[in-house]
Amino acid sequence: MTTPDHQPPTPDPVSKDRVYRSPMGIVGGVALLAITLWLGVDALVRGESRTQWLALAALILIVPLAAAFTLRPAVYANEDRLRIRNPLRVIVLPWGQIAALRSGYSNEVVTKSGTKFQLWAVPVSLRARKKAARRTARAAAERSAAARGERSGRGGLGAGGLGFGAPRGEADTDGPMRAETDKVMDDLRELLEHREKAESAQGEVTVRWAYEVAGPAIAGAVVLLILLAVG
């Protein structure tokens, strides 16, 4: 029996993952899979023998790929490592192996060896960036107008109890507004900055291919090609 004075050491708690996914990708994936399954099942039920085989092969090919490119992508981050689940690969990168997190026309992570990996789950939206920039400019203009109103109303009725000079942009943040995916990259950069030198955040980069996606898709493609070749 273990006495209270000689309890076995408990393992250090592991921080929970922060999970980042694309809501629009999930919505689009569900819609695409619903349409694919509806058409495929309809062909299986109503079609003739060859049509049924073609529909089955197409389903085996399309369904894994549609799920892989829409529902599967995710980014998991904790204090020790960044795990990227892309459509066909899973990449695990300790923070100590990451050189930079870049945002351009796509979001990507660059390792210290120079290898680049794209973050499929954190897509860049140029439209969202432009919208955030417009909101930032509008908030700055409102704050500037409010400041001018306050200065002109000093000593008179302008900004007194009537509130003509009350700033409209008080609810807005003082800094520039950011698109959601840019905020995600900011979070990841902050983690990198604080954890890249930690002892527990060192290790090797590992890459695993998603055979559970590639296998069925290849099998469906082979069967589909054979059926089309046979005629």
Image (cartoon, grey):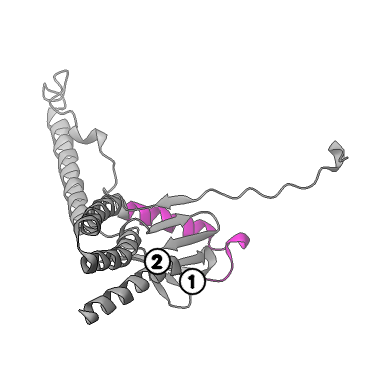
Q: Nearer the viewer, mark 1 or mark 2?
A: 2
Along the line of sight, the residue nearer the viewer: 202 or 190: 202
- 10 Å neighbourhood of mark 1: few (<14), some, or many (≥20)? few
In magenta segment, residue 187: yes
How far is mark 1 from mark 2, CA to CA? 15 Å
The answer to the question of whether label 1 and label 2 lie on touching residues, with beta carbons closer than 8 A, is no
Q: On the image, numbered disc 2 is attached to which residue?
A: 213
Q: On the image, numbered disc 1 is attached to which residue?
A: 207
- The image quadrant that residue 159 belongs to is top left
Quadrant housing the C terminus:
bottom left
Question: How would you classify the magenta stretch by its main secondary structure?
Answer: helix
- 10 Å neighbourhood of mark 2: few (<14), some, or many (≥20)? many
Quadrant housing the N terminus:
top right
In magenta segment, residue 93: no
Instruction: Please tell me which residue is depicted at 56% across the width and 49% down the height of the picture.
Output: 15
- The image quadrant that residue 150 belongs to is top left
- Whether residue 109 can be seen here: no
Instruction: Please tell me which residue is depicted at 35% across the width and 69% down the height of the picture.
Output: 217
Number of numbered labels in the structure image: 2
Q: Which amino acid does label 2 sit on?
A: Val
Instruction: Please tell me which residue is depicted at 18% across the width and 33% down the height of the picture.
Output: 168
What residue range appears in magenta? Answer: 182-205
Along the line of sight, the residue nearer the viewer: 212 or 4: 212
- Whether residue 202 can be seen here: yes
- The image quadrant that residue 143 belongs to is top left
137 up-or-down from 66: above or below: above
Q: Mark on residue 50?
A: none
Along the line of sight, the residue nearer the viewer: 12 or 144: 12
Q: Which amino acid does label 1 sit on?
A: Val
Q: In the image, residue 62 lies at what x, y percent?
A: 28, 64
Along the line of sight, the residue nearer the viewer: 156 or 134: 134
